[in-house]
Amino acid sequence: MTISKGEMMVAEISHLDEKGSGRAEVWRKNELGNPKKLKLTIPMTLPGEKVRVTVDQPERKRRKAMPDVIVEAHEDRTAPLCPHFDKCGGCVWQHWSYSAQLNEKTKHVQHAIHAQGFDPKLVKETMGMGEPWRYRNKMEFTFSPEGALGLHEQGNFRKIISLETCLIAGEEMVEAAMEVAEWVKVHQLKGYNKDLHEGLLRHLMVRQSFATGEIMLAVFATESPQDHQEAVRDLAERIEQKFPQVKSLLWLENTNWADRTQAEKSHILAGRDYIHDEMDGYKFRLWFDTFFQTNPTQAQKLVDLAIGMGKPQKTERMIDLFCGVGTFSLPFASKVGKLAGIEIVETSIESAKRNAEDNGISNTEFLAKDARKGIDQVLESFGHPELLLLDPPRSGAGGKVMRRIGRSKPERIVYVSCNPDTFATDIKELEPFGYQLKMVQPVDLFPHTVHVECVALLELQ
Ligand SMILES: C[S@@+](CC[C@H](N)C(=O)[O-])C[C@H]1O[C@@H](n2cnc3c(N)ncnc32)[C@H](O)[C@@H]1O
């Protein structure tokens, strides 16, 4: 069949890609009459579904197409709750029942470890949330050049969807963000245009501790608050009157081309420059740039699982690699003899030290070092650890770090991962050192997205 521009056709979804979109292949004839494959990426679809799509550029090999009609729906298809679902890039799987999402996540982890030669039966069923909504304690919204506040459109980082709600963020966080959006309208402030590198408002970060209730609101802007005194005063007054739980209202200057929530200068408009949070009964101070687990309910499960698998003993030495501000270090420190935390970001290490002090913990040392160098330094000062926990970023720890871990011979390794694929390649590196994978427990920290976290145990044979 030849396909002409704008022609409607029915495609069958064979599988989902790493971003959670459906993939389908259709055959067509080229201008010489030979068969040619057209690969389609179709968001908001599910495996096995038949969908009608309009093909806008049939001459291309790969195209993204939006589903016009679902001809045959997956049995677990469900109506998405959020009014922004069809545009927003935040949650791509709201049209799939929660139990089916969890199954898909388990399968992803099984495939990832099987691809590296491990037994997929070691993977348990993904632990989900009882109530998989309003789980995020931190959101970063973006201002459009016109000043609307929202999130990026699916697959289009240039376009911002103006939001009225967000069902995965805490309710008070959304209400506070909407107040800021209203303030922007009243003062007719301009948003930042990334292409032209002009405009005032760039991002709004909202973070709330679900344990203490304290909220931080941080406005990222290209100019100083002194240049907008009347508007800034009004913002502080509105927030103070309506949201007494905002304990930190910040104005952060960012003139950098990079589109990130970073700051060259910070100004406290009200309160302090950090908020108090808690995890596993331990107190943490969070600044605007502090990495902290964004789903506290499920993060608590990660901590419990890590302790259950690691079985820390009072006589043991432990390394917490990629320790951040000490989310795992503090609960483990009270159960081992000595703990060393290693982390590359200096402010996180400063924070980890202060968090240990605030919680009366004195058997820890924290090193601001790259993981590789940090392991060498700890081995010299403190000898071989009996227990090692690692929680690297999505890119994984990498072969060099994993081989150093293997040579340092901990009896037990607890690996906390946010990427099953890099987790699987990392643990493969431990096999020659005599480690055996004992179990993998996936945990859903990000319902309605493709992401899945795992806690795994490896033991030295
Ligand atoms: C997934 S976070 C985990 C943080 C912490 N375990 C927690 O749960 O809050 C990964 C951490 O690794 C740190 N990191 C990234 N690259 C690193 C490196 N090469 N060496 C040491 N730490 C690194 C990041 O700064 C980040 O804090």
Image (cartoon, rainbow, N blue to C red):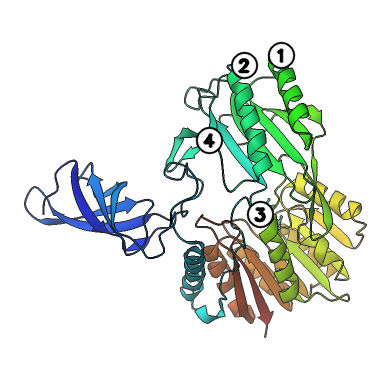
Quadrant showing the C terminus: bottom right
Q: Earlier in the sequence, mark 4 or mark 2?
A: 4
| Pointer 1 with pointer 2, Cβ within 8 A | yes
* Ligand 1 visible in quadrant: bottom right
Under circle 2, the secondary element is loop
Name the residue tied to disc 4: 163
Name the foreground residue: 178 vs 294: 178
Under circle 3, the secondary element is loop
Q: Which residue type carries mark 2?
A: His
State whether residue 243 is above or below residue 404. Answer: above
Q: What is the tally of numbered marks visible in this picture?
A: 4
Q: Residue at x 72, y 19 (%)?
A: 234
Quadrant showing the N terminus: bottom left
Name the foreground residue: 12 vs 438: 12
| Pointer 3 with pointer 1, Cβ within 8 A | no
| Pointer 1 with pointer 4, Cβ within 8 A | no
Under circle 1, the secondary element is helix
Q: Residue at x 74, y 40 (%)?
A: 215
Name the residue tied to disc 3: 295
